[in-house]
Amino acid sequence: MATATMLPLVPILKADLIEKNRIVADLKVGSSGGGSKPTAASHHPERFGGVRPYKVVGHRHIAEVEQELNAITNEAVSISFTPHAVNMVRGILSTVHTFPKQPLTNKDVWKALRGQYEGEPFIRFVKYQKGAYQLPDPKVTLGTNYCDIGFEIDEHANRLLLFSAIDNMVKGASGQGVQCLNLVMGIEETTGLKSTGFHPM
């Protein structure tokens, strides 16, 4: 959840485009993100067919997210964070509500995103006008180390909506570990991580 929240926010915070004390992250999480101890609430058959908010305030990942985001900016970052258990096994979709300091254009947001992630092998931008996958969708990332990032500007409410999708079992866990190990070992960053995923496009 921390990864899915931080990756779309980092470029926007570095570019100083948003209010840093008004960030709201809403996460949809598959049953594989239900923790290491099985409970009735985390059991997939029980989750099936429902959408259940849990740990709606004071979530343990808030501290990690704020710590890392505060390391890249000179103003204190404050984030609200609420996950929802949804009817999928793997994957996380993060919708992050932010509030621009001044009116933004698509060009402003693209400049920040591309400036941060140009050449990054596991970041993809998803913002299409047509088709079933106009914005990030966890289904497309299953079995991959990708983080798909998209955005939309809400002029009516002065919001910048950021979206990200990951496979929590790969990008959110083992894949991220392998990626870091590759960097530490000085080998190609993508080694062992080139899967195109489970969902044919």
Image (cartoon, rainbow, N blue to C red):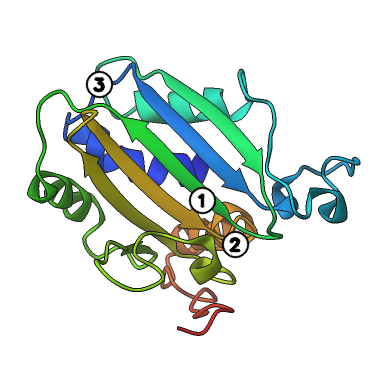
Mark 3: amino acid: Glu
Mark identifier at residue 19: 3
View extreme (bottom): residue: 200
Is the C-beta separation of discs 2 and 3 under 8 Å? no
Q: Quadrant of the C terminus?
A: bottom left
Q: First in sequence: mark 2 or mark 3?
A: 3
Q: Position of residue 10 (x, y in %)?
A: 31, 39
Q: Quadrant of the N terminus?
A: top right
Q: Position of residue 184 (x, y in %)?
A: 47, 57
Nearer to us of marks 1 and 2 is 1
Q: Quadrant of residue 45?
A: bottom right
Quick check: can you spot residue 2?
yes
Q: Position of residue 125 (x, y in %)?
A: 29, 62
Name above or below for residue 165 compared with residue 12: below
Nearer to us of marks 2 and 3 is 3
Mark 2: amino acid: Val
Mark 3–mark 1 Cα distance, whole angstroms, equals 22 Å
Q: Quadrant of residue 42?
A: top right
Q: First in sequence: mark 1 or mark 2?
A: 1
Mark 1–mark 2 Cα distance, whole angstroms, equals 14 Å
Which residue is more in the foreground, 187 or 6? 6
Quick check: can you spot residue 1?
no
- Is 115 displayed left or right of 76 in the figure? left
